[in-house]
Image (spheres, rainbow, N blue to C red):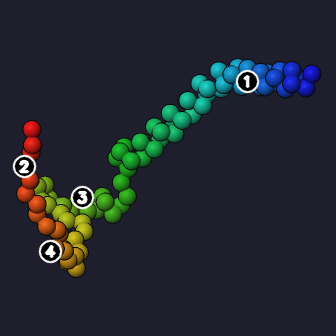
């Protein structure tokens, strides 16, 4: 009897979740889409902080600007390994 009761409870929970998900899924999708739209608008919708606006005002058209110089302290390892010549065999 306990097994039958457990199976019945599992089925009720499953179908209840299925019905509720059909009701609330469109609301959840709308909410996620709205949040993604806001995030996209902040990144690409012309939002600029005052420092960027001043920098663009000073920069002339066609001018190259380097924001960060690479580190000069990088040392490359000259011993990268031994070169092995090979032939393809058919």
Instruction: Residue 78: give its label.
Output: 4
Gap between marks 4 and 2 measured at Cα:
26 Å
For label 2, the residue is 87
Q: Nearer the viewer, residue 90 or 22?
A: 90
The quadrant holding residue 37 is top left
* Residue drawn at (73%, 24%) of the image: 14
Gap between marks 2 and 1 measured at Cα:
62 Å
Gap between marks 4 and 3 measured at Cα:
42 Å
Quadrant of the frame with the N terminus: top right
Instruction: Residue 14: give its label.
Output: 1
Q: Secondary structure at mark 4?
A: loop
Q: Secondary structure at mark 1?
A: helix
Instruction: Residue 56: give its label.
Output: 3
* Residue drawn at (9%, 38%) of the image: 90
Using the image, determine if residue 9 lies above or below residue 57: above
Q: Nearer the viewer, residue 89 or 27?
A: 89
């Amino acid at each position: 009897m306990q097994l039958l009761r457990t199976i019945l409870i599992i089925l009720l929970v499953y179908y209840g979740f299925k019905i509720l998900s059909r009701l609330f899924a469109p609301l959840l999708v709308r909410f996620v889409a709205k949040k993604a739209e806001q995030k996209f608008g902040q990144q690409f919708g012309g939002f600029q902080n005052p420092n960027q606006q001043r920098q663009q005002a000073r920069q002339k058209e066609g001018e190259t600007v380097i924001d960060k110089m690479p580190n000069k302290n990088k040392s490359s390892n000259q011993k990268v390994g031994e070169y092995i010549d090979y032939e393809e065999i058919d």
